[in-house]
Amino acid sequence: MTAVDLFVQQLINGLSLGAMYSLLALGFTLVYGIMELINFSHFNVFMVGCMIAMLTLQAMGLSGQSVILSGAPLVLTLLAGFGVSMVLCGFIGVGIERFLLRPLRDVKGPAAMITTIGVSYVLFNLVLLTLGSDSKNFPNPLPPVVFPIGGAVLRLREVLIWITAAVMMFALNYFTRYTKLGKAMRATAQDPEAARMMGVEVDRVIMISFFIGSALAGASGMIFGLYYNLAKVDIGFAAGLRAFTAAVLGGIGNVPGAMLGGVLIGLIEAMSAQALGSAWSDVVIFSLLVLVLVFRPAGLLGRLAPNKS
Amino acid sequence: MITRRSTFRIATGIASAAVLGSPAAYAADQAVKVGIDLSFTGADAETAARIANGAILAFEDANAAHTVKGVTFELVKYDDATATAGQYDPAQAATNARKMVSDKDYIAAIGPQMSGAGKAMSPILSAGNLATITPSSTNPDITDPKFAAEYRPAGKAIYFRTVATDAYQGPNMANYMAEKLKIKSVYVLDDSGAYGVGLADAFQKQAEAKGVKVLGRDRLDPKAADYSAILTKIKAAAPDALYYGGVGQAGVKLAKQAYEIIPNVIKAGGDGMQSADLLKGAGFPAVQGWYATVASPHVTDDPKTAKFRERYFARFKIYPDDYTVTCYTAAQVIIAAAQKVAATGKPVTRDAVRDAIQNVALPDSMLGPIQFDENGDLKNKIISVFQIQKDDKHPLDDPASQYKYVGVAPMS
């Protein structure tokens, strides 16, 4: 491998990681943008999404990497996996919002945020109790197609991750910018009281944003499984923390910011592992986060919001 | 599963042997106790039962055959696992050690199963001068003279082992890879845990001494999911082999991703990579070809042990594993030590038995020659090497059938 090949390969690795972080970061940013709430249950909704996707694929007769599909069956299987995990995770998010966070909506202080941490642990322990703590072999029906780029290799799963992430991010961006519901969301984000007076159903808007954010976590869970062929009960914390960092780095509450932050963190992680050793990745990522926040407190693309209170 | 009843059975066996038909000279047999401390409940219960059976068999034999004239053994079971810990609990292990030490009838002990329990028990046993022989705990610190003040404050070795330690897994595997696999270069990884870092350090030192070029050394975060960046770096360095010191948490992910990125590199690890979790979590084809080591001789496939296996199966209805044999051997050592003391006509006390264990020589145990050095470690340290080779005829997550024994890793 030449230095250029190596760079290209690490670029591919970093972009794939980044795509996954971006999708997860969107969930944080969406909820924060609307409610100014950091939703820590997102970590483990993602993990549950990965487990749901695994069980769905297994229910369709796939196990391990032994069954390889192609053509229409492959597409249908993947769509089913994405569909089931996204819809179920979406409803988990709605449930969390409706039954646990709505009663706290008017409570000042960190009560709602602490609740989301609690929910995160409940989800974690539910999976621990029912599925156990061992590493699970995530079924992967993708054919091992490889595209060589010089000495580097691009695998089908990487292409798939990029396309899926890009489609979802652009759809979300379009949705929040140009649809009626998206406009209602942004209105709620700016001032829930005024939005309500203008006829926006604030409760419904918040519920929908939870549904979308959690569905994206479900999609990330499926992507995680396909990329690593692995599902485990503790995957939520490490990936969730990076994604949260990505959201803050890009400017929390800002959709393109979350994408940028995710991709940046993925790239930094890959490149610093190459240049310094993987033990240093976290040091580099979080030092950079601190630096960005010192010089741009609102994040790279964020704008400092006027204080609402 | 060992229950209180099996201890009882040994005791009644002794009693009936004493009453029925034994010569009058044995009627006043000295009854001595041997404690066995393992994790009989919790996560390691199944292994503990298998291990304990080895000692039960050995003492039943010794009592039935009157191997030691004037002495009958009573094996007393101690469980060092607690419900709150879900596995071994060092505090419970310490309590057990105190109980044994405070009763003069105890002449020796077997156990513990886990190094963490051993660290808690060792100073207490040292104060009471009660020797124990562990069939399975491999942490090198407990018998390392560097830590003598901590683990044997009274000075004499009281923690003996019928297994080798982690300090030999790394270096011996380095020898094996240099001599048998003929590797010229290696990349070393660890999982940032105490076991993994120690193992990788020891491997790296010996690999360098053997003239193998160490192309790099890196550390995996066991909680992170992605190792593709570091594996890409390794791919670019193009080593002959990858050595990983660590346990399954990072190991499973490493095995999966290494298969995709560096499929043709020889991959090896310590006993942390010998597990059902690896076979289940990473699965075939990712795990195919990985090497792993175990800090004891592999004897259960050895024709020499066939008779033992049959006898064991007839008595317990399950098959023994390697640690059953190390436990059986531990019991044999205690019996041989007691025999030696009894032959001199002196009373069989724990002080005399400790000294006898220190000097015991079993030339042809199932594990090979058994002798201890002044720290309590085996003089003859054997590290067995296994390789994962897919065997479709057996369950693909069963370590006993998927790990093939490929030989002994040579000592330096």
Image (tube, rainbow, N blue to C red):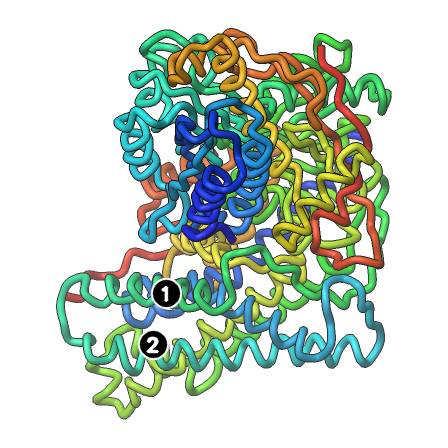
Query: What amino acid type should be assigned to the residue bearing mark 2?
Result: Ile
- Report the side of B119 relative to B380 (left or right): left
Residue occupied by mark 1: A41
Tell me if residue A54 can be seen: yes
Q: Is residue A277 visible?
A: no
Residue displayed at 53% across by 47% down: B49
Kind of residue at badge 1: Ser
Q: Is residue B379 left or right of residue B115?
A: right
Please state which of residues B286 and B404 is positioned toward the viewer in this rendering. Answer: B404
Marks 1,2: beta carbons within 8 A = yes
Gap in Å between the C-alphas at discs 1 and 2? 9 Å
Q: Position of residue A211 (x, y in %)?
A: 43, 79
Q: Residue at label 2?
A: A96
Q: Residue visible at 80% across and 28% down? A: B407
**Residue extending furthest toward the bottom:** A199
Measuring 65% from the left and 55% from the top, which residue is drawn there? B317
Estimate the x, y position of residue A43 in percent, counting from the top left: 42, 61
> Between A126 and A39, which is closer to the camera in this rendering?
A126
Measured as percent of width and height from the top left, residue A280 is found at 51, 31
* Left or right: where B324 falls relative to B90: right
Q: Residue at x 44, y 14 (%)?
A: B354
Binning the other alpha carbons within 10 Å of mark 1 as few (below 14), some (14 to 19) or many (20 upward) gives many
> Could you tell me which chain the residue with mark 2 belongs to?
A
Where is the C terminus of chain B found, in terms of image quarters?
top right
Quadrant in the picture for residue B323: top right
